[in-house]
Amino acid sequence: MQSQTATTATFVILAIYVIIMVGIGIYMSRRTKSSEDFMLGGRNVGSWLTAFSYGTTYFSAVVFIGYAGQFGWLYGASASWIGVGNAIIGSLIPFFLIGKRTRLMTNHIGAKTMPEFFERRFDSKGLKTIAALIVFIFLIPYTASVYNGLSRLFGMVFDLGDNGATYIIIAMAVLSAVYVTLGGYKATALNDFFQGIIMLIGIITVVALTVQKKDGISAAFDALNRISDSKTETGTLGSFFGPDPINLLGVVILTSLGTWGLPQMVQKFYAIKDEQAIKKGAFISTLFAFVVAGGSYFMGGFVRLYCTLGGDKDKTYIETVNGKPVYDTMVPALLQQALPSILIGLVVVLVLSASLSTLSSLVLTSSSTLTNDLIKPRIKNFDDKHQVMFMRIFIAVFLLISVIIACNKNASISTLMSYSWGALSGAFLGPFLYGLFMKKVSKAACCASFITGVGISVMHMILFSLNIEAFSGIKEAIIGLNCPLSLLSPINAGAFSMIVSLIIVPVISAFTKAPDKKIVDNAFSSLEKSV
């Protein structure tokens, strides 16, 4: 619990932050004239706003609170490799590889959302409908995981019980709904820029204080190497690749490659202004990811110096559930020890900034997809005014469902996020990526990817998370395999679904019929232009 002075300072910082967020929403509402303005900012967003919007959508409380704590505990300092993967594979490569093609092709065929891209690119209304349902359903657990991360931090700062955490979740949902509903994409992008600056300052400060508290980097690594890892071995938690490099690779794949197929990430390229903005944005977003993601995982690598499962009075005792530590409590415990209480307000705003920027992109992607791809085609005379109105209504519906799930504390932050990313990117990665580069990609291949991406995530959830008695035999048989790449992990299941998508799309396309040649040639004719 903070001192009275520190608590007051935190409330003042929060109040200023909220006023700025709402003010930006009101300002941008006057510049939002059409549904394309609301969804994509008129496709005229510059490099800095796009890069910061991409980065702040990428990283939230899920990374800072959930993943940094869990993988810092499991892999020690080697968890920093996740941040490196996020910067290079998740930020730099997609800007250069798919940024220009996405902007050109989606603009040429008139696609405002990823489901609409599948419809126009593959001449299939069915693909659009299925994709829209997948987006709406599987963005919900990701949103819930962001709320869980926020409630953990606020619970630590203000010593809140379960009811208090619920009120915080509701308040954050209302705040994100207000400025997204008012200003749409433009308000989200401008807020993301402001929030990104806060994240950069906050992460650098937190990492410096975390290491300083343990007498510098060398002393911290020495102390880390004296601690036994999960296999009761010493000398691994401070090593280059850590105690479990194979499963660490699974995390890198899920959190890095996944961005290539996530609708809330790819949609940033729909809205970017021109080719120069893409090139410039690539370097800005990569640097942002190195600092924010790299800093978060580097900080998380030292949680064992601050947390314990018992027997060390100098560390915070971490509770266990079914013999496993509650990972989501580790980073809040670290912050409580490493930071002066007067700086906790900075961390609160840091995590709030990261989370609200992600939430705004998620709700905007979900509501625009539901309205544009499911409602609009089925209602006559559905003009721009009605479309924006429905998007605002679905923002509220989406947030309400997410809040209800977030108030259930049984699922960890990383589990919720893993199932969401695994299903979404496992379904869309192959069809979207190959759809930009290969003319022979077929509708059947897209359907197969949709089925495997969602199927793998749902089956894993049924077998290993819901603990349904009827499937216990299958679960025990899989456990008995003793596979080095843990099939029990929803993270590895998500990474596996993405790799499957990349394999089956070209294979099935080779044996099935491609869309009509005129449709395909029209889509690819856009690539001969400049942005």
Image (cartoon, helix red, strand yellow):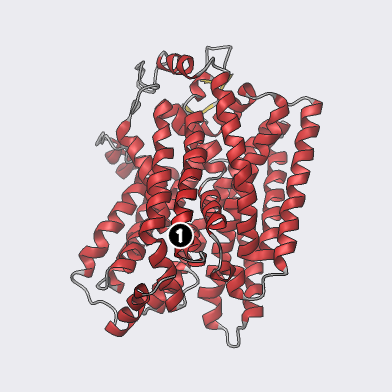
Residue 344, relative to residue 266: is it above or below?
above
Q: Residue at x 57, y 19 (%)?
A: 212
Residue beneath disc 1: 278
Residue type, numbered disc 1: Ile
Residue 349, relative to residue 390: is it above or below?
above
Q: Where is residue 159, by image quadrant?
A: top right
List x then y, in percent, for residue 119. 41, 76
Q: Is residue 220 visible?
A: yes
Local crowd size for mark 1, using a 10 Å CA cut-off: few (<14), some (14–19), many (≥20): many
Q: Residue furthest bottom?
A: 381
Residue 175, relative to residue 42: is it above or below?
above
Q: Is residue 363 left or right of residue 433?
A: right
Q: Is residue 463 visible?
A: no
Position of the C terminus, as image quadrant, is: bottom left
**Observer-nearest of 161 and 350:** 350
List x then y, in percent, for residue 428. 38, 61
Residue 394, relative to residue 177: is it above or below?
below
Q: Is residue 376 left or right of residue 225?
A: right
Please count the marks in the image.
Answer: 1
Q: Residue furthest front?
A: 276
List x then y, in percent, for residue 444. 28, 71
Position of the N terminus, as image quadrant, is: top right
**Observer-nearest of 136 and 502:** 502
Q: Residue at x 37, y 41 (%)?
A: 252
Q: Secondary structure at mark 1?
A: helix
List x then y, in percent, for residue 368. 56, 68
**Observer-nearest of 108 and 1:** 108
Q: Is residue 176 left or right of residue 509?
A: right
Q: Residue at x 59, y 60 (%)?
A: 363
Q: Residue at x 57, y 16 (%)?
A: 315
